Image (tube, rainbow, N blue to C red):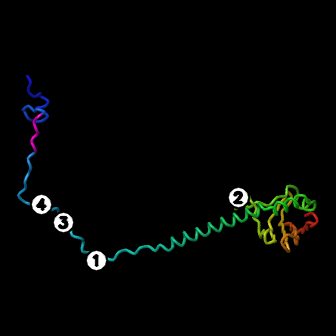
Amino acid sequence: MYGPSRSSQLRYGIAQRLYATEIPKQPQSETFSAPSKPRQYYTRPNVHRELPQLKSRWPVILAAGTLGVTAWAAFYLYAANQEKLSSSVMKQVMNIVKEDPQIKETLGEAIRPEPQWYLNGDPWIEGTINMLQGHVDVSFRVKGHKGAGTLYFTSVRKAKGEPFTILRFKIIADDGTDIHVPVTQV
């Protein structure tokens, strides 16, 4: 009645009773009389052929370098144009142009810088604006509801602390009309 249960007999494959104080027997070690069978060994193929030529990396490096320099130059030009566009000179010039009656008669109302598609609607400002060195020389396209033209503005300062002298302030319309903006307005 107190013998090993049927499940323990099936589990251990023995028909004897195990007690908690008995130490289990060590498994029998297996000894071999000879070394193990060696694995199959494959020799290297004895074909002597030249390695394939590697493709030159210079075209990729040159293309990446050219692309990088082009992107840097495009960003620099865009940033410089934005700086000119937001300068006080541009704002003052545009205020004068919008109020001039002769320009309104030629170009019409709503005079504004002509947007360029490659600048996402901003105008392209040619020239330089250098207030510290005392010279401003810009040109850009303007348009109204009647027509368009190119505005030219040049101004210099002879010495530090002196006011700027306007040398050129005119618009050449696309129809050939030359409009000089009076300097007294500035």
Nearer to us: label 1 or label 4: 4
Residue type at numbered disc 1: His
Q: Neighbour class for label 2 at 10 Å: few (<14), some, many (≥20)? A: few
Figure quadrant of residue 10: top left
Residue 161 located left or right of residue 54 = right
Q: Which residue is mark 3?
A: 41
Q: Image point 8% across, 31% down: which residue?
A: 17
Local SS, label 3:
loop
Sequence-wise, the earlier of marks 2 and 4 is: 4
Residue type at numbered disc 2: Asn
Q: Which residues are magenta?
A: 21-26
Alpha-carbon span between mark 2 and mark 3: 69 Å
Considering every residue shown, the one lying at the far left of the view is 33
Q: Nearer the viewer, residue 94 or 109?
A: 94
Q: Image point 87% across, 67% down: which residue?
A: 171
Main SS type for the magenta part?
loop
Q: Is residue 29 above or below residue 175?
A: above
Residue 174, percent across and down? 84, 66
Figure quadrant of residue 139: bottom right
Residue 106, percent across and down? 90, 62
Local SS, label 4:
loop
Nearer to us: label 2 or label 1: 2
Alpha-carbon span between mark 2 and mark 4: 78 Å
Residue type at numbered disc 3: Tyr
Residue 37, which numbered label?
A: 4
Q: Neighbour class for label 4 at 10 Å: few (<14), some, many (≥20)? A: few
Residue 118, percent across and down? 70, 62
Residue 48, which numbered label?
A: 1
Residue 29 located left or right of residue 128 = left
Q: Nearer the viewer, residue 175 or 129?
A: 129
Q: Is residue 32 above or below residue 49?
A: above
